[in-house]
Amino acid sequence: MQVSVDKSGPCEATVTFSVPRSDFDREYQAALKSGAKNLTMKGFRPGKVPTKIVEREHGPEVHQKAIEHFMGQAYDQAVKDNDLHPIGHERIQIEDIKMDEGKDLEHSFKVSLRPEFELKEYKGLEVVSELEPVLDQELADAINDLRMQQSTPLALADGEELPEDGQAMCNLSWECDGEMILEREGLRLAPLAPIPGIDADKFKEAMTGSKNGDVVEFEITVPDEFDKEELRGKTATSKITITEAFKMVPPADEDIWKILAVDSQEEFDKQARQRLETAKAQQESNRQETVLLEGLIDTYDFELPAMMLDAQIETRKNQLRHELTQNGVPQDQHDAQVEEKSSEIVAATEKAVRALFLVNAIAEKEEIKVEEQDMAQELQRIAQQHQAEFDQVVEHYRKNNLFQQVQIELLERKVRAFLRENGKITEP
């Protein structure tokens, strides 16, 4: 078999191979005989099915497997002899490869190569810390939010007014140019959580003090994400009918203390502050890592593998189409909205792919690896987050070939942490 490689670009090579007909026929016949030994067919003893019958029943399939065999050999030989660093190759439809009678097997395919670039200095990168202390008001707000989250709704009697921190079951309708453009029933709304298109202060003011049966009206601007494009930005009337109003009854102090397993307000405040400090520190660490990695990415401009980039762009576009479907956007509007965001998708994909290669290069140089224990811990975390069994999560990720994606994410986390730990964090 003859194999040649043409590097058509810094991230792509074309592999061309040729197999003499005699060699191909030898492999084909050997595959037929192997198939005959393992084939069970009515009227013949096991392993005694004539080769001609195997060829008649399974010839095309065996022929394709023989082609696959030589393509695999060509790929391996091309990589070894030319010191290639492949990251994938084009999808090949084996059934489309034709061999004329008596002719040699000849074919070419493209291979994507890892970009070649020199790592710049990535240790000692500077970033200014933005970590701030937990203020007393932040602590008070956090505890108040927790009380609200643990509060239980109590239906108001007829004539009682909806408090600012209450909730209400409502029916919602939007009318524009004399046409009803939106109707929803059984919505749970709260004065402190405005709906899209309505000013937060006006919403709170209008909803607070309303009673069962009241109809609250607003003039709104139809939001940009509304499914009917021709109505976006227009002025419409929003009507909210209060069907049942509730006040929120906060839990007793003792019930709140149980959340952090303490028995006094002083100890509760202390632990709550510690948790806020930990959360702030983690948030700041994440921010620093992002600043460092993105700043580093911006200093590189190496060529990217076209096939890989195109595939990633198409994947992101398909994800957007799926989101549009989930948001109720009509199918005939998908292409226009995807095209509108096309340049944004391309830029984001290029940055993500460049980050992938940069992260891997740093990981290789620093011998940063994802161990089996790391994978197990991450899958366990995912299981707990989704309240699922560990084995079920493992099976789901195995069936959907998601282990590599988890590994990539874990490796990036480790490299991000490495950049921060080896960076120069300065105080403002």
Image (cartoon, rainbow, N blue to C red):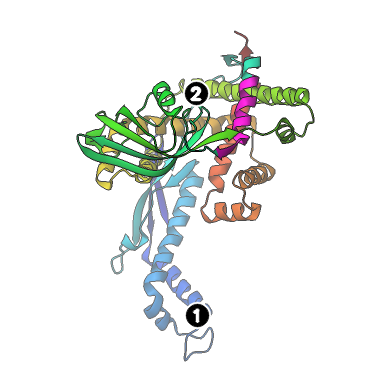
Quadrant assignment for the C terminus: top right
Q: Residue most toward the right? A: 263
Say few, some or many: other residues with alpha carbon within 10 Å of mark 1 (under 14 / 14 to 19 / 20 or more).
some
Position in image of residue 257 (x %, y %) = 74, 32
Q: Is residue 149 magenta?
A: yes
Task: Tell me the amino acid under the disc marked 2.
Answer: Glu
Is 316 on the left or on the right of 232, as rendered? right
- Choose between 382 and 45: the one closer to the eye: 382
Location of residue 222 by image quarter: top left
- Choose between 373 and 180: the one closer to the eye: 180
Q: Given this view, does label 1 or label 2 mark the residue nearer the observer?
A: 2
Q: Which residues are magenta?
A: 139-154
48 over 364 or under it: above or below: below
Mark number for residue 3? none
Is 128 on the left or on the right of 201, as rendered? right
Position in image of residue 317 (x %, y %) = 35, 41
- Choose between 212 and 83: the one closer to the eye: 212
Q: Are marks 1 and 2 in contact (CB under 8 Å)?
A: no
Task: Tell me the amino acid under the disc marked 1.
Answer: Leu
Position in image of residue 386 (x %, y %) = 59, 46
Q: Which residue is under mark 1?
A: 39
Position in image of residue 290 (x %, y %) = 54, 24
- Can I make out residue 84 in this image? no
Q: Which residue is under mark 2?
A: 294
Secondary structure under tag 1 reads: loop
Location of residue 425 by image quarter: top right
The residue lying at 37 percent from left, 71 percent from top is 60
- Tag 2 or tag 1, which sits nearer the N-term? 1
The residue lying at 38 percent from left, 74 percent from top is 59
The residue lying at 50 percent from left, 80 percent from top is 39
The residue lying at 61 percent from left, 44 percent from top is 382
Secondary structure under tag 2 reads: helix
